[in-house]
Amino acid sequence: MKTKYIAATIVVIALIATGSFIYLYYQGQAGSLPETLINLVDDTGYKTSLDALPNRIISLAPSTTEILFALGLDKKVVAVSDYDNYPYNFTAWIAAGNMTSIGAFDNPNMEAIASLDPDLILTTAGVQAPTIDSLRNLGYKVLVLNPTNISGVLQNIDLVGNATGKNAEAAALVKSIQSRIEAVANKLADVETKPKVYYEVWYDSTSLWSAGSKAWQNELIEKAGGVNIFVDQNVDYFQASAEAVIERSPDVILLPSQGMGFGDPFWGNLDDVRARPGWNSISAVQNNRLCQVDSDTISRAGPRVADAVEELARFFHPELF
Amino acid sequence: MNEDNVETSYFRRTSRWKSSVILLIIALVATVIVSLNVGYAQISFGNILAILGKQIPFLNGFIDSSFIEPKDALIILQIRLPRIIAGVIVGSALAASGVVYQGVFKNPMADSYILGVSAGAAVGASFAILFGIGFSFLGLRFVQIAAFMGALLAIFIVYNISRVGTRVPITNLLLCGIAVNFFLYSVVALMEVIAGNELKGIVLWLMGGFSSVLWSDIWAVVPFIVFGIAVSFLYARDLNLLALGEDTAQHLGVRVERVKQVLLVLASMVTGAAVSLSGLVGFVGLMVPHITRLVIGPDHRILLPTSTIVGAIFLVICDAIARVIATPFASTLELPMGIITMFAGAPFFIILFRKKKQSYSL
């Protein structure tokens, strides 16, 4: 009699133990998220932890959209801004109802964002801080990417890879960007004279804007084997004078293909540039080295940074490329 | 007989005033309810009622909310409702302080920004946008605190430059206000030039709007605004007497300098608090008092409360328009509200003014 009881007790205990072991094992399986989702630190120093791999991502800026699509997250992006145009023609997608727009990226429509129920929002500092504050206050997970140089972009790609479970893809993308920029550097290793470069941000009858040493384009120009004529200005974008440009006589003038990202170039056509008062004394004008650059590749701190460096290097050192 | 007439006309006036205030309150409630239905997200009126009902204690047990999506509740309670309430508060604040300024200055061009409140707030906000990103104090945004501080500082400066002994002549206030306004706006322009990435933030702030307002932002300003408006209501009779001229008012027993001081400080505090929440919203403080005066008449005892409500209605409508103006073009673009207030308000005022211009008096 007694042994029966003991045996029964042992069987029951064994069953419970096995059951709970299996239960705990599967619990552990289900609960074990990639560690990379915890304590993601963005460019504002804010720490975010995700509860699961995001499936409904909203990208509020063109550069963050480019990173997401470069990592193959096409299916997970549920909305972009009105300004996004790469790698696909999102305006057409939005018109056809295949993508949702959140409006202008610097003043997004909060209701449009909320109605998509996103589990991750990527943005740049171009989206205003109060908006980002509000989104976080409403309980959304927001990563702010605000790189000021190429290594910042590479870090951002890693960060997005971590947040979305695309670590391997991110590492591969970073490696390919690095090696392409290195290849340019290797070709330029023996170059002795670097052209002086003037990058025009804006020009009209009332003002002229260029880029100083803190501007994103300054590093691109350096990596491509040029020297920004305003590298001594310790700011990002600033209002320069036409006299300063003429006096520093750049060897190359870089003109973005679109004014402020939209429509026709603000500088008209190349003849208009040559006809600016006093500009015929500039070396770039005399030697016809006015270069049109794609305004998106040169101004977006995104995965096309290697394209920008290669394009600039071709302008600066046509004999090598 | 004569006495009888005075009495009946007094009662008639009182009941007319009462009914116009009641009508306007009904109109405000209706505007709020309609604008709750206006927005990018399509949420049915029944669902909106259920979402709101769920928030009412005791009643919420009777409401079946199983069909409500959490994101819809979030949109109504955390995005749309705060905007509407912010519209009510800022609209009434700007309109009420506009009435007070126009009454004290006896000048139809006076508005809630005349003493440099707007420029001071703009300097504070631009500074915060440029240098204080992400910083907050007791859960309040730095931009909001800095705008409020800037507004108060500007008034303090204007007031002290204008002061002659214990008196503050109106002309001095007007001129100093204008000078300080120009000076401070040049500071804002300077900050815009060096702003870089944050330029758009400053520009949007200067155009005003509620696109990302939170409940905490609203609670921070409500005490200032409610207190300021309530106390200025008590001075409505004095404002009527001031309209007869400062000397006459003095002889009729109004402590003119004291009343002016109290009203200017209150109105500026109310405006500063409102602007810190909304950014610079033009037109409301200048035109809403005029529009109300055209319809109701110049008596401050009724003008002040009615303008306050009309301002609230006006701004709630303008924000609703700003929210959905681009929707017919299949776009999610949202306009800054300040554009709407001026674009819609100015023609409205001109039409009303042409109809009533003969009988207009301040």
Image (spheres, coloured by chain):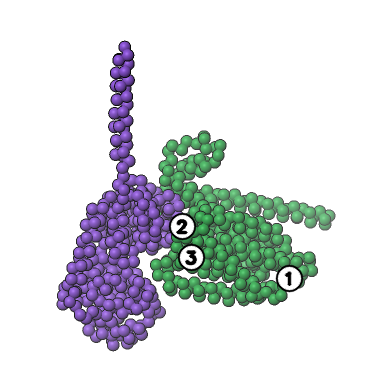
Chain colours: A purple, B green
SS label for mark 2: loop
Q: As drawn, is B10 to the left or to the right of B292?
A: right
Residue B138 percent across, percent down from the top left = 52, 56
Q: Name the amino acid type tagged 1.
A: Glu
Q: Residue at x 56, y 73 (%)?
A: B181
Q: Residue at x 30, y 15 (%)?
A: A3
Q: Name the amino acid type tagged 3.
A: Ala
Of the residues tagged 3 and 2, which is closer to the observer? 3
Q: Which residue is mark 1?
A: B246
Q: Which residue is mark 2?
A: B211
Q: Residue at x 53, y 59 (%)?
A: B277
| Label 1 to label 2: alpha-carbon separation | 43 Å
Residue B254 seen anywhere in this rendered image of the structure = yes
Residue B84 seen anywhere in this rendered image of the structure = no
Q: As drawn, is B207 to the left or to the right of A187?
A: right
Residue A104 percent across, percent down from the top left = 38, 60
